[in-house]
Each structure stands twice: as C-alpha cells, then as structure tokens.
Image (cartoon, rainbow, N blue to C red):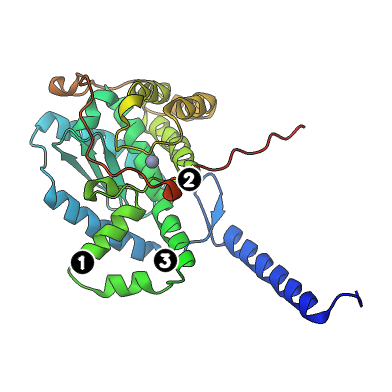
C-alpha cells in the first residue's frame, strides 16, 4: 500500500467506515412487521402517530362526512375486523366515511382511516373494501410515512424539524402538509406524493394477509385491482400511478397460497355484503380527479432489477 498516498487511503477508509455504519443503521434500526425489511426511521412512533392524528382531524373537518348509515356501518364493520387481524401497534382506530366522488382512501399513523364514497363502486363488496382498507392500514403499520419522512430529513439534513413542528400547538398548516404528504394522503391538499413502488407492493402484500385473517376471501383482492385497472385512462388519486394495477393484481395472485392459509382458519365471510345500492355503479367516464400531476423526481419508479441467471 505504500504507493497509495495517505490522504487517499484515509479518505477511502473513512468512506468505508461511513458506508458500513450506514448499512448497519439502515438494516438494523427498524423492521417492518412480517416482511422483516430493515430501514432507518428517525422519528419515534409516538411522534409519527401524533402527526397522523392531528392531520386526520384537520382533513376530516374540512371534508363532508357521510350520513349514509349503511355505508358507515359497512366501513366500520370491515375496519374493525381488519384492525383485529393486523399486528397490534397500539393504534386507536377510527373510521370515517367522507361523502365525495374522489376515488381515495387513507390510513394515517395511529389508525386513523378515511374512506371516500367515490371508491366504493370499485370495492363492490366488503372484501373489495377490505383489500383497500387492508392496504391503507398496512402503510400505517409498516410506517411507510415515517420512513419516507426520515428519508426526507436525511436528505435535507433536518433532524430536529419534526420535533420543532410538533411543539407548535394547534397544528399548523405546515404540520398538516408535511404529515399528509408523508403519509400518502396528500391529494386532498393538492400535493400528490405517491409512495414508492416498494411501499405499494409491501402494503398490497401485508393488506392481503390482514384481509384474509379478518375473514375476507383473499381472491377478491386481485379482482378489485382488475376493476380498478379499467381506469387507466383516468388515474385516480387512490394509490399512485405505479406500480401498474395489473402488476399489483399479479403479485396478489402470486401470494394467494399464503393468504388462503390464514383465510382457512378465519371466520370466513367470503366477499361479505355488497356496498350500499347507491354506490354500486362505476361512473362512466370516471369523474375528473382534482390532483396535481406527480412530479417526475418524486415518483421515480425503482430501476428494474437486472435479470440474474440462476
Ligand atoms: Zn398505497
């Protein structure tokens, strides 16, 4: 090594130590329940939940709550069954039905779930709704919002930003914007920042297991995506533009065997009750969505992995 000048050697050594530390940090800090995927999360669960609860309160207050007793009962029933089937993260679940043609749904950290009536025709029945809600609850349980916020904090070098924001009482519009954006429900405030492809597929997979364990036929999940993929000409807010609905249906089909094992020892509600009659017709053409075009750099799909020969 004597030909190597010392500063370069030192630099490369430091770099290696840095990469090693970062790798350890990234792979050991936090694991997604069930998938075991390691990732770095810089904010605590309680901070994350606090933001979720505050943002939920603001959104729900702004939107029109549904008064349709049948729709509310349906969402509550499916939601409670899913909540009981999902890993216990100490969430205090809340389910709100919002009367709006927006095709959307979200679950904020802490278990705060909102379903827009615009998505009900695509759900068709309780099992379709369970696929949607299971997916959204999985995002919250897997802490995808916290992970994304942490990535943003790392990139911007702000490690105390969240703390500072949370100290503001009464929740500022900034808190709502940050939380809603990070937790994937940003379409309501005109900012669409979709989850990454990895997060979407992980939420699909975990949501499928939750729905099966809750007693809903997991075969209904890919069916929901097939109905949804017919919307390709007018991509709705709900779930981002990637991965394609067809890809999601394919993954959900591939995971059926695992889900069926859970379903077999569940109470087995099958497809459950249909959605209320007034929400059964898929509008044609689907209503225009108020949404910002996803920015290229924010929606970067993962690079396709190079095919490895076994
Ligand atoms: Zn999602």
Residue, disc 1 = 172
- Residue density around tag 2, few if under 14, some if 14–19, many if 20 or more, within 10 Å: few
Q: Quadrant of the N terminus?
A: bottom right
Give the Cα distance between marks 2 and 3: 24 Å
Q: Residue at x 42, y 66 (%)?
A: 43
In this view, the residue in front, 46 or 246, is 246
Residue 12, by quadrant, is bottom right
Q: Quadrant of the C terminus?
A: top right
In this view, the residue in front, 152 or 90, is 152
Residue, disc 3 = 43
Q: 127 above or below 32?
A: above
In the picture, measured across the screen, residue 237 lies left or right of residue 65, that is right
Q: Quadrant of ligand 1?
A: top left
- Residue density around tag 1, few if under 14, some if 14–19, many if 20 or more, within 10 Å: some
At numbered mark 3, what does the secondary structure look like: helix, strand or loop? loop
Give the Cα distance between marks 1 and 2: 29 Å
Mark before the other along the chain sequence, 3 or 1:
3
Mark before the other along the chain sequence, 1 or 2:
1
In the picture, measured across the screen, residue 277 lies left or right of residue 205, that is left
At numbered mark 1, what does the secondary structure look like: helix, strand or loop? loop
Question: Cβ of disc 1 within 8 Å of ligand 1?
Answer: no
Q: Are marks 1 and 2 in contact (CB under 8 Å)?
A: no
Q: Is residue 237 visible?
A: yes
Residue 270, by quadrant, is top left
Q: Are marks 2 and 3 in contact (CB under 8 Å)?
A: no
Give the Cα distance between marks 3 and 1: 19 Å
At numbered mark 2, what does the secondary structure look like: helix, strand or loop? loop
Residue, disc 2 = 300
Identify the residue at the far right of this view. Answer: 2
Where is residue 247 drawn, in percent x and y? Answer: 49, 28
């Amino acid at each position: 090594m004597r030909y190597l000048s010392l500063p370069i050697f030192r630099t490369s050594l430091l770099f290696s130590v840095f990469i090693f530390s970062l790798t350890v940090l990234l792979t050991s800090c936090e694991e997604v329940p069930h998938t075991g995927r390691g990732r770095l999360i810089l904010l605590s669960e309680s901070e994350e939940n606090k933001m979720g609860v505050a943002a939920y309160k603001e959104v729900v207050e702004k939107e029109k709550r549904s008064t349709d007793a049948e729709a509310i009962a349906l969402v509550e029933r499916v939601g409670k069954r899913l909540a009981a089937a999902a890993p216990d993260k100490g969430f205090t679940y809340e389910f709100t039905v919002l009367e709006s043609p927006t095709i959307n749904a979200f679950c904020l950290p802490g278990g705060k779930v909102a379903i827009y009536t615009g998505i009900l025709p695509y759900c068709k029945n309780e099992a379709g709704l369970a696929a949607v809600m299971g997916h959204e609850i999985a995002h919250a349980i897997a802490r995808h919002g916290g992970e994304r916020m942490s990535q943003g904090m790392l990139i911007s070098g702000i490690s105390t930003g969240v703390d500072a924001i949370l100290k503001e009482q009464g929740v500022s519009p900034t808190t709502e914007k940050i939380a809603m954006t990070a937790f994937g429900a940003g379409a309501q405030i005109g900012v669409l920042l979709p989850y990454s492809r990895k997060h979407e597929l992980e939420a699909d997979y975990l949501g499928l297991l939750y729905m099966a364990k809750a007693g809903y036929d997991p075969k209904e999940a890919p069916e929901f995506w097939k109905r949804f993929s017919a919307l390709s000409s007018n991509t709705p807010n709900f779930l981002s533009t990637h991965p394609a609905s067809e890809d999601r249906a394919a993954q959900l089909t591939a995971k059926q065997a695992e889900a069926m094992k859970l379903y077999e020892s569940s109470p087995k509600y099958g497809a459950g009750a249909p959605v209320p009659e007034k929400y059964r017709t898929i509008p044609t053409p689907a209503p225009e969505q108020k949404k910002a075009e996803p920015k290229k750099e924010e929606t970067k799909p993962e690079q396709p992995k190079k095919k490895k020969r076994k």
